[in-house]
Amino acid sequence: MKEKVSKNSMINLNLEFVDEAVDKQELAKIFNKGEKALEKLIELSREKAAGTGWFDLPINYDKEEFLRILELASQIRDEADVFLLIGIGGSYLGAKAFTDALVPDMGCERVRRHKQIPEIIFVGNNFHPRPLYDLLDHISDKSVYANVISKSGSTLETAIAFRIIRSYLEERYGDEANNRIIATTDLQDGALRDMANRKGYETFSIPGNVGGRFSVLTAVGLLPLAVAGINVDHVLQGALDMKLDFERKALESSIFKYAVVRNYLYQKGYEIEILTGFEPDLESFAEWWKQLFGESEGKEGKGIFPASLSYSRDLHSMGQYVQEGPRKLFETFIHVLEQRVDLVIPEDYEDIDGLNYLSGRSLAEVQDMALRGTSLAHKDGGVPNMRIEVPRLNAYYLGALVFFFETACALSAYINDVSPFTQDGVEAYKQNMFVLLDKPGTEDLKEELESRFHG
């Protein structure tokens, strides 16, 4: 069901603390590159070029698979105490961004029982033994389902965790374990697809022309979101409406302006972008954003470094650096205009803490004033900042925000003359690791690598 929104309630970009510092002639040059980048993105998506499948996902998603997702999610909510999501990078960051934002009290068993959702635990995103060790103890008396997400099935962090969890489930449930494991992977190829076919796992597909960091609107994200009780129809509708808004406004859209302005600032020497705001529920969303932009833009010695802070907490740790440190950074605030809940500050007749001047005011109002005061102070300190204004924090607007950033990221990379859909640099550490772990076929390289370590 489509969520009703007014024509003026789509995501908006506020540039009031950037505009006065802009050289219009220099901005025009970046604008022209942005126009060419937009033409390139649209042309490549029409040609269904590699990596561009995400652009039409809000319209061209697999409707049959979507219905299977809803059906399986309902079954898991009925039967599972714990739902394990095994994946790393784009295979889990998008789902975690949504669940942390929209189900922030998921750790509370009473709330989960009321909402009829299992505890969702994200694993397979590091090599440390303690999380997995503790997990196996935690789930020993609980009904468990697991969703392993990997296009190839050979990503080492995920593959190791899956082997350990698979072994545990098979020992505990026997053949029934195969009915409790869901594989989200390549449609045809890869180790995980082969295993799923042999074992008879329920499977969902990662489209071949959608990269991991752009995959949250595929089964990669939609299944765990549906298990968490998030309305995935609203997620896709938000993304679709953001896409239609972008296509209608084009060069006047907030997406296009964001891509252009951040690259203008980059050309002016601002090499670090801090995604921030006064929304603790969006901290995991910032982690998704960092992968999206870092892996898409950081190439050929180029790229804005994506960082994140959470205010007001980090104003008491990193605020000094932002205010008076090197002038190489700019900020992008996510500003949620309408809070889901609120509290009013009470009056205290003794006023020992001196806060009666705030009596009767809401925490949401205090937070908004803190955001305004912070953005103004940082602007005065030489930190340009812009605000992405989101009407409310819900499934619809998070879906819209995903499409907003995915599109802006692709445009931004093209403006900077790099491909947004490759990540060859990620393989360097993997190759060294495989050699040092004695992977078959790497024997000739081990002596050379080990000679480079001292002590």
Image (cartoon, rainbow, N blue to C red):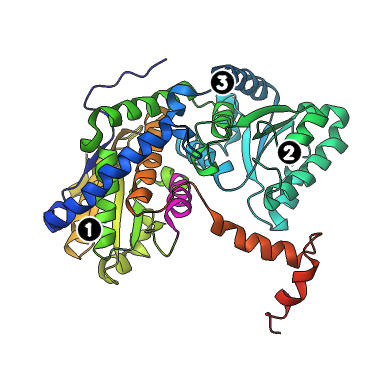
Residue 214 versus residue 422 in the image, above or below: above
Total labels drawn: 3
Q: Residue at x 61, y 58 (%)?
A: 427
Is residue 391 among the parts visible in the rendering? yes
Q: Residue 1's spot in the image, x, y percent?
A: 42, 15
Real-space CA distance between mark 2 and mark 3, rounded to the nearest whole angstrom: 21 Å
Mark 2 vs mark 3, foreground winner is 2
Amino acid residing under circle 1: Pro
Of callouts 2 and 3, the N-terminal one: 3
Rendered view: 257 above or below 247:
below
On residue 384, the disc is 1
- Using the rendered image of the protein, determine whether residue 354 is visible from the camera's viewpoint: no
Task: Name the residue carrying label 2.
Answer: 192
Instruction: Name the secondary structure under disc 3.
Output: helix
As for residue 294 lying within the magenta part, the answer is: yes
Which residue is at the front of the view, 26 or 310?
26
Please provide percent x and percent y for residue 149: 65, 39
Magenta highlight range:
285-299
